Image: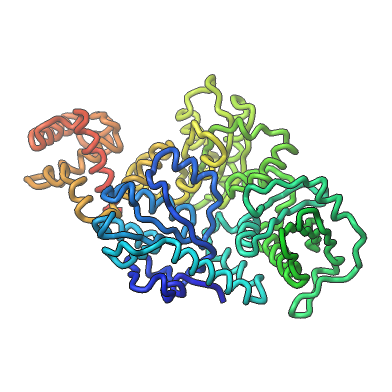
Amino acid sequence: MSVTVSDILRLPCLKGARVVAGQKSLQKVLTSISVLEYTDPSNLQKEIFDRIDFLDGEIVITAFAGIAEDVERQCANVRRLASAGEVGLILYYVGILMPRVDRRLIELADSLDFILIVMPEGRMDLRYSEAIVEIMGTIFEEQKAEVSIVSDVLEQVSRLPDYRRTVDTVLQIIRERLRVSLILLDGQERILGQAMWPASLELDMGELLDALAVPAAQTDILMEDGSSLSGNRQPSCAALPGLRWAWHCPLGLHHSPMSLCLVKDGEPLSEGLVGQITETVRLAVNIWSRRHAEVNEAELVQAILQDEPLKMRRLAEIFHIDIASVNAMWVARWEGEGAEKNGRDALRQLRDGLKQWCNTVISEIYEGYVVVFMDWPDTAPDASRLAESVLEDMPSRRGKGYLVRCHQLADTSDVRKAFLLIREHLADAGRIWPKKRCYTLQEMDYAVQCRLLLEEGEEAVSAAMLPLSLLEAGGEGMQLAHTLCTWLLDADGSTARCAEFLFLHRNTIKYRLGCIRERLGYPADKLPEQLFLYRAAALRRLMKG
């Protein structure tokens, strides 16, 4: 068994604490606890978050001291923590620093299955250290008492989102659990992945492999159930300077000669534990990445989108691809009959078309999405026209295709985040702009912001929908609102195109826009008022969808 959130709620340090959100996640396994000190959701905090490997299983302590009365920033922190895989927050000093836990924060956390634990309110004698010591002590004791880690680690990974079920994630979980460094190697002793303890540790791989290159007995690693690791020899072990121990463990895979290096400071790992770690990684490779050591472009696309930097760099070197030059990504998706064939046709057309303008083009079908990475040059033609031509020139017209263009991406981390955003919110973009087939990353982000606003609660939605509510209040209000939404979202402010979409005469559209002006007190194309009308129209379609 592992320590869950429900378990720590019974500890003395959390006596009197209340769970106000995320009750469905109380059985999530905890692996560590941290303190959120810098709560301003700025670019600096984003950069700090991007440089840290967050794992599923960490819970965070904070008092939101710097943003005690700023609910919007509190919500922004919860969204960022949840997206990073954090389990939840323990809120201290409510009623002292934070006046109260706002309903919007609770509703947001519930929608994300993110746990909010509120410590006894109005208490100034609470200390972070008590929770840190007791919770981490409980986790350490449980880990020491456990005999097997194989099923536990694999079960923990299986509960993660699809894109995080990777061999790298398994390495990171084992690192946190046993405070050991792990390096995964291919048959040529090239690094496929690694997780170092501590994260800042730097090792000379040449010296490490030289120290481990010693004769080993040709015996199998026996597991508790009596099975062996596919006839592998016993792992080699070496004592390194500074009370450091190292092991080299072949994984015994039939499809790839991969091996695992372990490095541990202080007390050495037991032979049984070394075997369990090796078995866990072997199973992870078989379950989630049988092609982890293969060399092909599909693996490079997967390495980028699954955030496996070492594997990505190794494959890029083999293909002689300048990954740093990638600054754009196009993602296409087909629905309905012929979707698979349309995807393959689009992959070929996009690859051939973009190679005329870009030096680097990496393309593959990933999870049903056509994904193309490229170094988009300033001399390239209009991207929107090129994207539209791909959709229009498809040999098969059955089904419906969508394409999202993402430009000015800073690095592969931004590429991965953009793909996840598209995967989660492409349907929302389709509801807001149903006449469109090509979207930009900015439009996808706008769809996300509209969805988040809907989740803030009735009061926030009512305020945002006020312009349309005023319009709908009088006679023919629903007709006018429908015309306004079409004119803004589908026709881009064009009277002629709006008339085409609604099968009406242009003069009818002009008349209705005049009625809208009289009812609102300003024309629909006046800024900044038009910005609020546009948002209200988008929210209206999302709610109807």
The residue at 62%/77% (across/down) is 145
- Which residue is most to the bottom? 225
- Which residue is most to the top? 379
The residue at 30%/56% (across/down) is 105
On the picture, is 413 further left or further right than 515?
right
On the picture, is 184 further left or further right than 53?
right
| Scheme of image coloration | rainbow
The residue at 34%/45% (across/down) is 449
Position above or below: 482 against 148: above
Residue 439 visible (yes or no): no
Quadrant of the rendering where the N terminus is positioned: bottom right
The residue at 24%/43% (across/down) is 537
Nearest the viewer among 117 and 537 is 117
Q: Quadrant of residue 164?
A: bottom right
Position above or below: 448 against 492: below
Q: Quadrant of residue 271?
A: bottom right
Nearest the viewer among 414 and 295 is 414
Please provide percent x and percent y for residue 493. 26, 30
Please provide percent x and percent y for residue 356. 61, 25
- Which residue is most to the front? 125
Residue 523 visible (yes or no): yes
On the picture, is 124 further left or further right than 346?
left
Position above or below: 269 against 67: below
Please provide percent x and percent y for residue 331. 51, 41
Please provide percent x and percent y for residue 344. 60, 44
Nearest the viewer among 500 and 357 is 357
The number of numbered badges drawn on the structure is 0
